[in-house]
Image: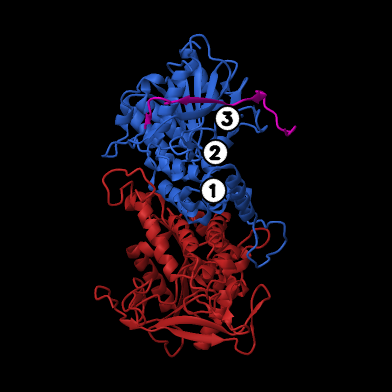
Chain colours: A blue, B red
Amino acid sequence: MDPTISSSLGLVSGQTFTFAEDEPFVLESGATLNPVTLAYETYGRLNEARSNAILVLHALSGGAHAAGLSEENGKLGWWDDCIGPGKPFDTDRFFVICSNVLGSCYGSTGPASIDPTTGQPYGLRFPVVTIGDMVRAQVALIDHLGIDRLLCAVGGSMGGMQVLEWTARHPQRIRSAIPLATTGRSSPMLIAFSEVGRQAIYADPNWQGGDYYANGHRPDAGLAIARMVGHITYLSEQSMHQKFGRRLQNKERFGYEFQTEFEVESYLRHQGLTFSRRFDANSYLYITKAMDYFDLSTPTGALAAAFADSTHVKYLVVSFTSDWLYPSYHGKEIVSALTAAGADVTYLDIQSSWGHDAFLLEVDTMTRLLGSFVDRVACEEGV
Amino acid sequence: MDPTISSSLGLVSGQTFTFAEDEPFVLESGATLNPVTLAYETYGRLNEARSNAILVLHALSGGAHAAGLSEENGKLGWWDDCIGPGKPFDTDRFFVICSNVLGSCYGSTGPASIDPTTGQPYGLRFPVVTIGDMVRAQVALIDHLGIDRLLCAVGGSMGGMQVLEWTARHPQRIRSAIPLATTGRSSPMLIAFSEVGRQAIYADPNWQGGDYYANGHRPDAGLAIARMVGHITYLSEQSMHQKFGRRLQNKERFGYEFQTEFEVESYLRHQGLTFSRRFDANSYLYITKAMDYFDLSTPTGALAAAFADSTHVKYLVVSFTSDWLYPSYHGKEIVSALTAAGADVTYLDIQSSWGHDAFLLEVDTMTRLLGSFVDRVACEEGV
């Protein structure tokens, strides 16, 4: 364990929940899965009234390890800034749950899982899943934990899609919702970037139509390219100037060669390489597909109808001025739909230069904002 | 020839100019090329005073065929909207030249050319070229055509970089300059997207370190992915909504499969595929590299010094509000540097939803703007 990394939560261990062992889990597509496992972690304790549960929802490449130091590998959770004693999602007061999504490669049922009917990894025989399927699996987890109603569901990017799906399709199970840097429907630009990443994976000869698990050669190059594209979209033009500018990588003058010249190239290659070691290419395909399909609007394009039954839910919607992947107007569309539906909405378009990643990087602003919102909701609920 | 395509210029034929046959052409890197060929086309006639020449400079994937119908393949030139009798670059009045860039695959010396020392295609043995090298080759062409001073140099994107290079490094050879949707130095975001495209080409097993010309298998998949990424960056979030929205491709409901679901996916795949048939992957590597290196600023970041000797040049600088690849502030930086240097500048930040491609797509606005600017300069010069 790296002694320089610490967390007020200390060591945490992951858990799994398996359901649909007898009755298959029917997906939106009509296909079925049987059984289904979700990996999850919890921090803090569920109170007697079972009224203090906060569900944290991760983005495309995340997992259940949101806070504390993983007992398994010593790594710090991806949102440790916000979860722990005295933090916005105060584990002395709240019971915080983070569930890995269906289709992922971090302990939940996904394309790398063994298909019980064949004894082999699913690969592309794994059925296409949607954000709705991911959330219905989480509902089963919440049932299993004995929680009737979440105090709050919170998440950014694809996590925010899940938050909106919770309030739209399971409004009676939720008291408040914090969708961050997200949208009510995936834009064509989002679909386009996802498709480029998928094409890079398909084009990798190691991909082998998805059946690469047995042969020891994974489509790392394709997945790395997909991640490089993704990483650019998570930053902003301005933050790339701040972070890299036109600085050269370990050299004082141009080499006029096809090796790395600029720091930004080195950064991207490193991000691609490390991601391809930790993530499964097929999971990347399935999860980006789930995001593509996400659309809470009616065929005429109206979003408000989706929230008709969630007017009792309190919302904190946040967008970021330099987020060009989920531009602020997407946040404003959500707010417009929610106010049209009569919901109680707080909205902030936060001035930030960090692009889409701002929901994780604007730590001071976000901790204050999330803390005061959750405190208000908790007080109203008598938690 | 497609009878539905017409041009007021009619059929045009390409030409080539070869130089550095004895003395090698020394590149910015210090490497040499010998000989160098540029493909070019001309429209209209050079007047007796040799004062009516307009040089049109193309972007990353363009070529010398800017206007009219190619005698070779019947295709319409990429800027036929602006070049021809009665058009802004009026061929009844001006002598318009479009030169293919060094490093390209459209008739000029590039990595697919035969290396005279080996009798084999250069491949990655072709030296890295810069925007400065491209422009110095064009200077040789202009010399060859007997033109002492261009009335105007005009181009968008990488074409705009060449325009700025002309005014910064060869100010005595130019009377006016129109850099469109461009920058005085490539941004880290631009470098990042280029690097992703290059990595996609490197990752294609058919690339073979650049030596694929002989074996008949080209790195089409890698080049197609590079082009798909590029295409997204040429559009805007808004124009993708207008152009595609979330419309499905030839289906009424989701297929929940990894085939194309959305129109935008189909569009990108088609763009990638057709591009890989018409362009050379190694040229893509070299030309994007040239763009990466482009930087007219001093080590302290100041641009104005670059234009110190071009205060006699009249400038029309244009940016587009939805261009996020070359955001408007890059145009404003150019204008700020030019005004600091004391140059005569007209600047427009054109309201457009078409993103970077707006310089080609906002036809009405652009034809009026370019026409009146060039007319003013021509009148001042007595053309």
Q: Quadrant of the N terminus of chain A?
A: top right
Q: CA distance from mark 2 to mark 1?
A: 18 Å
Circle 2: residue type: Ala
Q: Are marks 1 and 3 in contact (CB under 8 Å)?
A: no
| Residue B180 horizontal side relative to residue B120, left or right | left
Q: Position of residue B299 (x, y in %)?
A: 68, 61
Quickly name the residue at label 1. A227
Going from N to C along the chain, the mark reached first, 1 or 3, is 3
Quickly name the residue at label 3. A66
Chain under callout 1: A
Crowding at mark 1 (Cα within 10 Å: few <14, some 14-19, many 20+): many
Which is more toward the observer, A93 or A320? A93
- From where the camera sits, is residue B359 visible? no
Q: Position of residue A30 (x, y in %)?
A: 32, 35
Crowding at mark 3 (Cα within 10 Å: few <14, some 14-19, many 20+): many
Which is more toward the observer, B84 or A357? A357
Q: CA distance from mark 2 to mark 3?
A: 17 Å
Circle 1: residue type: Arg
Q: Which mark is residue A358?
A: 2
Q: Magenta region, mostly helix, strand or loop?
A: loop
Going from N to C along the chain, the mark reached first, 2 or 3, is 3
Which is more toward the observer, B95 or B14? B14
**Magenta highlight range:** A1-26
Q: Is residue A73 magenta?
A: no
